[in-house]
Every structure is written in C-alpha cells, then in structure tokens.
Amino acid sequence: MRHLPIAILSACLATPVAAPVAAADAPVAPPATQALLHDIGTAPSAARIEADIRQLVSFGTRHTLSDTASDSRGIGAARRWIHAEFERISAQCGGCLEVIDVAGTISGEDRIPEPTEVVSVLAIQRGTSDPGRYVIMSGDIDSRVSDVMDFSSDSPGANDNASGVAGALEAARILSKHRFPGTIVYAALSGEEQGLFGGKIVAAKAQQDGWRIEAVLNNDMIGNIAGGNGVVDNTTARVFAEGTRVTETPEDARQRRFTGGEVDSPSRNLARYIDRMADLYVPNLDVMMVYRLDRFGRGGHHRPFNDLGYPAVRVMETNENYDRQHQDLRTEGGIAYGDVIEGVDFDYVAKLTALNAVSLAGMASAPPPPADVSITGAVTADTTLGWTRPPASQAPDLAGYRVHWRLTTEPQWTHSVYVGDVTQHTLKNVVIDNYFFGVSAVAKDGAESPVVFPGAAGSFGGYGTP
C-alpha cells in the first residue's frame, strides 16, 4: 500500500490532527532511510534464483512421502541439496551460518498414516548483540499433484514452492555478507502439503528453546505473475496477516473490547512494516495487505507460528493460477495443467526476495520492538504512551523512540513524532478516543522496529534475558 515516507508526511500534516509543535530543543531524528537497505532492495539475482528453482524441480518429486535414499529423486535428495547449498553460502562468509536439520517423526495422520521423518533445514545467522531475537524467512520444500497421497508421480512444484525456497537461499547469499544485531534464520520447511508439520516441529523447537521471535515471513508461491483471472501483474505482492491472536486470554479479550487492537496484532503491524519497506526500498513493488490469516479457508506454514502466538505472515504473489497448483501434469481441453517451471517469472521472484531481504535486514538492524507499551488519556485532551527500555547490551545502537498514530479507519500509520531516548511521551491535544497509537524503536543509523500497539493485543513480547 503506497504511502509517503515518514519524513515527507511530517512536513505535510495539513489535516484536522493537532500535531505536536517541535520545541527548539526537540530531539533530532536519525536518518529516514538506510543506504544498505537500498542496496539490498536491488541485490537479488534472477539468474541465481532460476538455477535454484531448476535444481529443485530436477528432483522429480519432493512429496513428503517420496524417496529419501536416492541422491537424485525425492525429498531426501532435495533437502540434502538445500543443506549443502546453505553450507556453501556459509563457507563464503567464514562460517557465519549454523546449518541444522530439525526433524520429527509423524504418523497416524490422514496424510501421513505411516511413521515418516519430516526434516526441515535451517540456516541461522547469529546476531551480534541480541542473538536471542529472531527474524525468520521460510519456504516449503515439499510438492504435490492432484492426489495429495501420490508420492511417486512427477511433481515439479516450481512455483509451489521451489520459488519460496529459492528466495530463502538467495536472501541468505545477500544478507550473510553483513552482520546484524538480531539473528536471521533462513528456513526450508517440510511437510507443508501434508499438514504443516515442518512448521509445527520448528515452531515447537523455537518455543522450547526460548526464541524471541519478532517476525516470521513465510513465502509460499512468489513466482507467478499470470493469474487465472486473466491479470498479468509483476508489481504487487500480497501479505496475509491475522488479527486477534489465537492465544489471547479471556482477560486480554475483555480489555481489547474497550481499548481496541483487533487490527493491531503484532502480525498486522509486521505486515504494515513490510508494506513500508516495499515503498522505501524495493523499486516498482506495492504491497497489498490482506487482513486474514491466509487465503479463504486455506493455510500455510506461518500458521503454526501464529498458533503459538508469534508474529507471522504469508508473503506471496497477488494473482494465483489454479491450473498450476496441486495438479497432475497433463493437457485437457487445450489447457496445460501442472506446476511447471514455465509458470515462474524469475525477475518477480527476485523482487519478492528483495522485499523479504530488506524487511529481515531492517528488523535485525533495529533495536527490539518496545516492550510493555501502555497508554493513558481517557477524559483528557492529551494522550500519553509509556514503554520500557531494553538492556543496553541488547540495543547498543538504540537512538530513541518514535510515537505513531492514525485514524482508526486508516490501514497504515500516517502520523509520527520522534521523541528521543525516553520511556514516556505525551501527545498534546491528540485525543485518545479518535486514533490508534503505537511506538517503534529507532537505531542511530535510522533502522526502525515494527510499531507496537499498546497492551497485550499488540505486544511483540518482552526483552528476555540478555
């Protein structure tokens, strides 16, 4: 969704809002944009992405129940190649990636009736000052045809979802050349088509190990530009984000009823962040935010993370072609069916990979999102927000904070003021009843966290143990 950069908006507040008047000693905001993110926004290579997708397609099928022993066919060969490719990327950065397999055995399920090892591959780029904070980009290894239990037929899965895995590999190549305060994870998840099992296993590991997950960007089909609706579009992407968290307690729900937050979950504010990064750093790309967990009645690998309360969204193409999803390879009535490589636009995959890369880099560069954000101001003309500061060791480059607000019907944050390194700020003559409010953390180089809505409804979590 297009909107003016904050610096321009601040100069154009010719609206009914009574904006704060800058005092002579008002804190000076860090730079509005980062040169590194501009570079990252054009760095992904369509040629490298094409090579990765072709390699994944060459395994014939990547069905979760397919061959695991062969070196040339089946999901076993595919996941070993992905692991080796992450290791090659790590070798180029002096071993900066920790490449691990995360596995679990699934059985007794409708789509996995017999004991089957579901193996996902993670490449972890540890943060320099806040390694316990994680931002994750994921894609799915497995593929399928019309019969979800058919594990022997050719199932190229070029767009669904070799495109997402290729994007994660390319993001790792680009971002591993740099160091960031927060930890970045590049994930190739298995078992998606059989019931989101790879994501469930990894999300459970993250919870057990105490990962402070700031964001999960699940990339599922990021390569098709010619939709079944006849639209050809290589300039937009969709970001699906759930509203109220499924982990909300009855008391949280009671509070939210009176203070709001239905459209300001951390996943929604993560989507707004990604939208803003597209506007600032990715040429010729606009984000369509969709206020829904996923496509109507369907699912993806971000959901297991949402189920545990983590901020997670689905990033994907805007126009799907259902003739090329979950289809046997065939031609009927002059229509070619099947998820073949001819249906993938590699330049478009590169563009959506750039969207992920700038979002990951932006969040990993920024201080952690503010914790314990509170708001007061009922029956007054002013609104006061408060928050807590992270341990200095987790945010050595913290410059300060920015307070945001918008009309309750606006999809994106429209007004903001940089307030410096404080833990409370009062917006004079900005009435609490009329707007939604939030706070973001800003680094000295201008890197900024997602906006945090006050209270449990919008919380990204605490700071954990430094």
Image (cartoon, rainbow, N blue to C red):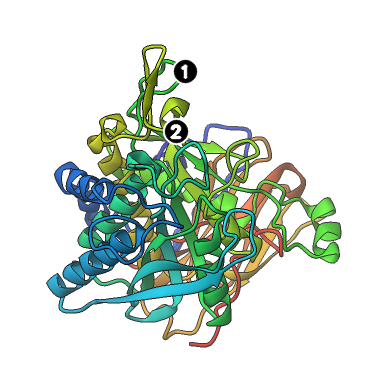
Label 2 to label 1: alpha-carbon separation: 18 Å
101 or 436: nearer the viewer? 101
Give the amino acid at mark 1. Answer: Asn
Taking depth in this image into account, of 335 and 189 the one nearest to the observer is 335
Of 227 and 407, nearer the camera is: 227
Q: Residue 77 versus residue 465: which sits nearer the camera?
A: 77
For the residue marked with disc 2, what is the amino acid?
Gln
318 sits left or right of 374 in the view: left
Residue 382 image offset from top left, x and y in percent: 72, 54
Do tag 2 and tag 1 residues touch (Cβ < 8 Å)?
A: no
Tell me the SS state at disc 1.
loop
Image height of 421 relative to 413, above or below: below
Q: Which residue shows up at 37% across the image and 26% down it?
A: 330
Q: Where does the image place residue 315, in percent across and percent down from the top left?
A: 45, 45
Residue 229's mark?
1
Q: Give the crowd class for mark 1: few <14, some 14-19, many >=20 residues within 10 Å.
A: few
**Picture coordinates of residue 95, whole percent (x, y):** 20, 79
Which of marks 1 and 2 precedes in the sequence?
A: 1
Q: How many marks?
A: 2
* Label 2 residue SS: loop
Where's residue 48, x and y in %? Answer: 16, 49
Dot in front, 2 or 1:
2
Q: Which mark is residue 327?
A: 2
Q: Name the residue: 64% across, 68% down.
A: 386
Residue 386, numbered circle: none
Identified at 40% across, 80% down, the residue is: 131
Q: Residue at x 44, y 84 (%)?
A: 392
Rate crowding at label 2 as few (under 14), some (14 to 19) or many (20 or more) other CA atoms within 10 Å: some
